[in-house]
Amino acid sequence: ARRAPASRALHILQGLPKGDKLELVLQKGTELGAAAFHPVDTARGVVKLEPKRAAERTGRWTKIVEEAARQCRRDDVPQVHPPRPLLDAARALPPGTRLLVLDEEESALALGEAFRSCPPDAPVALVIGSEGGLTREEVGALHALGARPVTLGRRILRTETAALAALAVMAHLDGALG
């Protein structure tokens, strides 16, 4: 039996990682309940896609999430947005979206605590930097847009691990996992 989509939309703003790491995030993130993926260009990211290549990749990424949704029997298919600059993606989120940013320098507010404080019907977007992390300027600009910096704990995780661990935490707290 197929299950209904989660009541809360979870958006992942993922800094473009090297290699095929984004494909892993898309596939496993779909299984974990993400509603949308927003690949983003960040200041420290080394991957920069030309428009033609970005369109090709977006098509490939869409096929990956379609197959993952079919495999895990989701009724819905997450949306994959074309790559764009981080702040453009953050500004384009649906109205009322609560914006959280994984920040390795944040140690006071745990992701779970911040997520629990979001209204249960509000979409939540999580920003994850690429391999180099986010600059202080990016975190500050996101904060100016209303983002709350959060931590997953003391360990520094790889970008693809951080995205999936965070999705698992949020899915668990939403009652969709575990």
Image: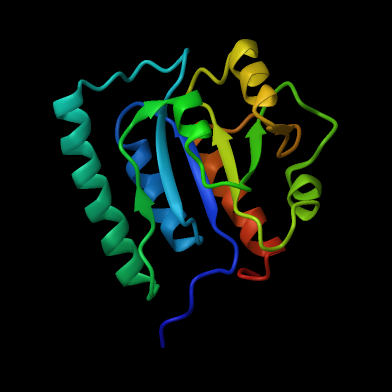
Q: Residue at x 20, y 46 (%)?
A: 60
- Image point (76%, 50%), residue name: 112
User: Outermost residue toward the bottom?
Assistant: 1
**Residue 28 image-quadrant placement:** bottom left
Q: Residue furthest right?
A: 108
What's the residue at 50%, 61% (across, down)? 33
State how many labels appear.
0
Q: Quadrant of residue 151?
A: top right
The answer to whether any part of residue 169 appears in the image is yes
Q: Nearer the viewer, residue 76 or 129?
A: 76
Q: Horizontal placement of 136 versus 114: left or right?
A: left
User: Is residue 160 in view from this perspective?
Assistant: no
The quadrant of the image that shows the C terminus is: bottom right
Which colour assignment does the render follow? Answer: rainbow
Q: In the image, is 27 to the left or to the right of 114?
A: left
- Above or below residue 173? Residue 114 is above
Residue 91 point in image, percent of width and height: 52, 32
**Compared with residue 134, is residue 121 higher up or lower down, i.e. above or below?**
below
Which of the 4 image quadrants contains residue 20?
Answer: top left
The structure residue drawn at horizontal position 36% and vertical position 53%, both measured from the top left corner, is 79
Q: Specify whether 35 is left or right of 172.
A: left
Question: How far from the left and from the top, in percent, is residue 127?
Answer: 56, 35
> Residue 146 at x, y = what percent?
69, 32
Q: Image quadrant for the N terminus?
A: bottom left
Query: What x and y, as percent, mark residue 126?
Result: 59, 41
